C-alpha cells in the first residue's frame, strides 16, 4: 500500500472518531410525580352532590382523583375534570358516607405507586347540619289499655317527646284533642317549663272513651305542641296519634236458638258550644250541650247537673230518695246565672238527642287558660235503677287586650293634596298590661306616610301615640283604618282595628297674574271704573283734532293680602 493511501485511511479514521465523539446522546424522559397542596372545600355535607377542587402541581391531563383510607388500591375513584397542571375538579356523589378521607391524585393509572400523591384528612364528609331552632319530635307513644280503649274504662296516654333541634325549647304547651275521647283532669292541656337540646320528656294525659266503638280498631288523637326559642320566636308542631280501641261489636250477643239481647240506656254529650266565640273574664254566656242517648232503651227523668253532682241512688255520697246533689262542683271559674246548675230535661228516647242550655258567667279573676267542666247526667233506666253518667267538657278563657284607638287632639278640616298630621293614640282601657305588635295606618282616600310603628307593652291606662301624615286626593269624608296585630294566650295571631273619619276640603288656589298688569306681582285685584258722560264728550272732541281719544277710565287695583301657608304643630308621639 502506498503512502498516499495510508494517509487517506488515517484521516478517514480520525474524522470518523471525531464525529462519534461529537454526536449528542438522546435525552431520557424523567416523569415528575404530582403534589397536593389543598382541597377546596375541605368539609362538605352529604345531603347534596358536591364538587371539590384539588390544588397542587404537576397534574397530568389523564390524572385521576380518588378518595378513601390509607390504602390507595381500595380507594374510590371520582369523576375527574382536568383544569390544568395545578387544578383538578372531582364530583362527590349524593349520600356519600360521612367520615374523614384521604385524597389521592394518580397521573398514571397503570403505575399508581410512582405517579401519585396523597393528602391525609384532606376531605371531611358530614351529615346535614342540625337546625339552630328547637324541633319537637315524638319518639314513642302508648296507652296502658292493653286490650284497647274500652268505653267506661279510663286510661292514660303517654307520649315521649324529644327535642332534636339545635337549641332549648321553652314554654312547652301540649294540647290533646280527640272527637271520640274525653280529656280528664286538665282539659287536655299539659304545660312544661322547657326541653333542652337532645333531651326527651314523657307527657301523660288521662282520658276516657266518649262512646262505644262498634266495628272500629283504632281512633285518632290530635296532639299540638307549642313552644318558643331563646329569642322569643314561637313554633307549633301538630301530630296525629292512632290508638287501639276495643271493638264492642265482639261483645254483642249473636242469634241463637233462644234469642237474647243486651239492652241499655247511655247518655253522652256529643257536642257543645257557646254563644260567645271568645270567652273573657266577666262575660256572661250561654252554653248549649247536645245530649245523645246512644242506647237502645229510653232514659227516663233525665237531670243535667252542670259542675258535677248526683241524684238519689247514684252511688256513694248521694243523698236520700228524691234528693239531688249539685252543690259539690267547682264554680271558681264558671258560675250559673239566672237558674241553678240543675235542670230537669225529661225523657230521652233511644237513639235520639236534645239540646240543653245553661247560662254561665266567667269569674272576673279567672286567668286565661283551658278549664275542664264536669257535667252529670242522672236518669232512670228501664229497670228503675238510678244512673249517673259523668262527662267532662273543656272551656277556653282568653284575656284579649281592651284598647281604644282615636286622636289625642281635635283634628280640623284637612286640605286636598297637602300633608296633614293624624295625631293617633292607643290607650289600654283594661285592668292588665297588654302586649301589642305593629300599628299600621292606611286610607283609601290618599297616601299615608309614617304609617307603621311597634307598640309593645302598655300598662293599664298607658297610651301610645303616632303622628302619621295623610295627603288626601279628594274632598269629603276620608276614612282612616288603624290596625294593630297581637298574639293571644293560645299563640293565635289576631288583630284589633278601628276606622276613623276626618273632613277634607278643596285646597284654595290663588288667581293667576296678568302679565299686562303692571301691578300683577303686587298681589292686587284690578277693579274696572265706570266712564262718565263728560269723559265721553271730551274724547269726542279729541278725536276731531286727531288727538288720543282712548278711554282713560283705567282700572283701580285693590290690594289683596297674600295667603299664608297652613302650619299645624306636630305633637311628638310616645308611650305613657
Image (cartoon, helix red, strand yellow):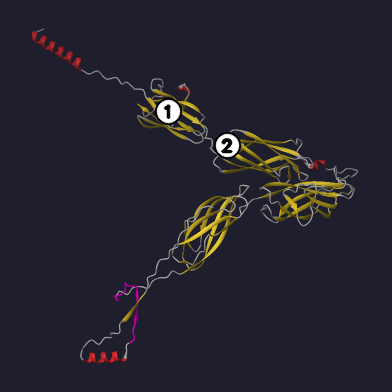
Vertical side of 136 occupied by 547: above or below: below
Report the disc number at residue 249.
none
Q: Is residue 525 found inside the magenta-colored segment of the image?
A: yes
Depth check: give the residue in front, 125 or 65: 125
The local crowd at label 1, few if under 14, some if 14 to 19, many if 20 or more residues have their Cα within 10 Å, is many
| Residue 555, quarter of picture | bottom left
Q: Position of residue 68 (x, y in %)?
A: 47, 25
Q: Which residue is mark 1?
A: 65
The answer to whether mark 1 and mark 2 are in CB contact below 8 A is no
Asked which secondary structure carries label 1, the reply is strand
Q: Residue at x 54, y 41 (%)?
A: 231
Q: Position of residue 331 (x, y in %)?
A: 75, 49
Vertical side of 350 occupied by 227: above or below: above
Vertical side of 501 occupied by 67: above or below: above
Outermost residue to the top: 1
Q: Is residue 535 visible?
A: yes
Asked which secondary structure carries label 2, the reply is loop
Report the disc number at residue 168.
2
Q: Position of residue 70 (x, y in %)?
A: 47, 21
Amino acid at each position: 500500500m502506498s503512502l498516499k493511501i495510508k494517509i487517506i485511511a488515517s484521516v478517514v479514521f480520525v474524522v470518523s472518531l471525531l464525529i462519534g465523539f461529537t454526536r449528542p446522546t438522546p435525552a431520557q424522559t424523567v416523569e415528575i410525580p404530582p403534589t397536593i397542596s389543598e382541597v377546596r372545600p375541605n368539609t362538605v355535607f352529604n345531603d347534596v352532590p358536591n364538587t371539590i377542587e384539588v390544588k397542587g402541581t404537576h397534574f397530568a391531563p389523564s390524572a385521576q382523583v380518588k378518595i378513601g383510607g390509607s390504602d390507595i388500591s381500595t380507594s374510590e375513584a371520582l369523576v375527574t375534570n382536568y383544569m390544568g397542571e395545578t387544578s383538578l375538579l372531582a364530583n362527590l356523589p349524593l349520600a356519600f358516607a360521612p367520615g374523614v378521607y384521604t385524597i389521592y391524585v394518580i397521573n398514571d393509572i397503570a403505575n399508581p405507586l410512582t405517579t401519585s400523591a396523597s393528602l391525609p384528612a384532606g376531605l371531611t364528609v358530614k351529615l346535614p347540619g342540625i337546625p339552630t331552632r328547637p324541633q319537637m319530635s315524638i319518639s314513642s307513644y302508648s296507652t296502658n289499655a292493653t286490650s284497647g280503649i274500652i268505653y267506661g274504662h279510663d286510661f292514660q296516654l303517654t307520649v315521649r317527646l324529644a327535642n332534636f333541634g339545635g337549641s332549648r325549647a321553652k314554654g312547652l304547651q301540649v294540647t290533646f284533642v280527640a272527637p271520640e275521647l274525653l280529656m280528664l283532669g286538665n282539659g287536655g292541656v299539659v304545660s312544661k317549663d322547657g326541653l333542652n337540646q337532645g333531651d326527651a320528656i314523657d307527657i301523660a294525659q288521662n282520658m276516657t272513651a266518649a262512646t262505644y266503638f262498634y266495628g272500629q280498631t283504632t281512633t285518632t288523637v290530635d296532639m299540638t305542641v307549642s313552644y318558643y326559642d331563646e329569642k322569643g320566636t314561637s313554633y307549633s308542631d301538630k301530630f296525629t296519634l292512632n290508638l287501639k280501641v276495643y271493638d264492642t261489636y265482639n261483645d254483642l250477643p249473636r242469634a241463637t236458638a233462644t234469642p237474647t239481647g243486651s239492652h241499655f240506656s247511655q247518655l253522652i254529650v256529643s257536642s257543645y258550644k257557646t254563644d260567645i266565640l271568645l270567652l273573657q273574664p266577666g262575660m256572661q254566656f250561654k252554653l248549649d250541650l247536645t245530649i245523645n242517648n246512644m242506647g237502645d232503651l229510653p232514659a227516663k227523668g233525665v237531670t243535667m247537673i252542670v259542675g258535677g253532682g248526683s241524684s238519689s241512688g247514684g252511688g256513694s255520697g248521694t243523698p236520700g230518695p228524691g234528693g239531688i246533689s249539685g252543690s259539690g262542683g267547682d264554680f271558681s271559674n264558671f258560675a250559673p246565672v239566672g237558674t241553678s246548675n240543675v235542670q230537669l230535661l225529661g225523657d230521652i228516647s233511644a237513639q235520639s238527642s236534645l239540646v240543653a242550655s245553661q247560662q254561665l258567667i266567667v269569674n272576673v279573676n279567672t286567668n286565661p287558660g283551658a278549664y275542664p267542666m264536669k257535667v252529670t247526667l242522672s236518669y232512670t233506666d228501664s229497670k228503675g235503677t238510678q244512673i249517673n253518667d259523668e262527662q267532662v267538657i273543656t272551656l277556653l278563657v282568653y284575656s284579649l287586650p281592651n284598647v281604644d284607638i282615636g286622636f289625642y287632639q281635635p283634628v280640623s278640616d284637612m286640605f286636598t293634596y297637602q300633608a296633614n298630621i293624624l295625631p293617633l293614640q292607643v290607650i289600654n282601657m283594661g285592668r292588665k298590661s297588654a302586649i301589642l305588635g305593629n300599628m299600621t295606618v292606611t286610607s283609601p282616600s290618599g297616601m299615608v306616610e309614617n304609617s307603621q310603628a311597634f307598640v309593645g307593652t302598655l300598662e293599664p291606662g298607658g297610651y301610645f301615640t303616632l303622628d302619621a301624615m295623610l295627603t288626601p286626593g279628594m274632598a269629603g269624608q276620608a276614612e282612616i283604618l288603624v290596625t294593630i296585630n297581637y298574639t293571644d294566650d293560645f299563640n293565635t295571631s289576631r288583630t284589633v282595628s278601628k276606622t276613623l273619619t276626618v273632613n277634607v276640603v278643596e285646597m284654595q288656589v290663588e288667581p293667576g297674574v296678568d302679565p299686562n298688569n303692571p301691578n300683577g306681582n303686587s298681589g292686587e285685584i284690578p277693579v274696572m271704573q265706570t266712564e262718565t258722560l263728560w269723559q265721553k264728550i271730551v274724547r269726542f272732541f279729541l278725536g276731531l283734532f286727531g288727538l288720543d281719544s282712548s278711554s282713560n277710565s283705567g282700572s283701580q287695583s285693590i290690594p289683596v293680602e297674600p295667603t299664608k301657608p297652613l302650619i299645624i304643630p306636630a305633637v311628638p308621639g310616645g308611650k305613657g
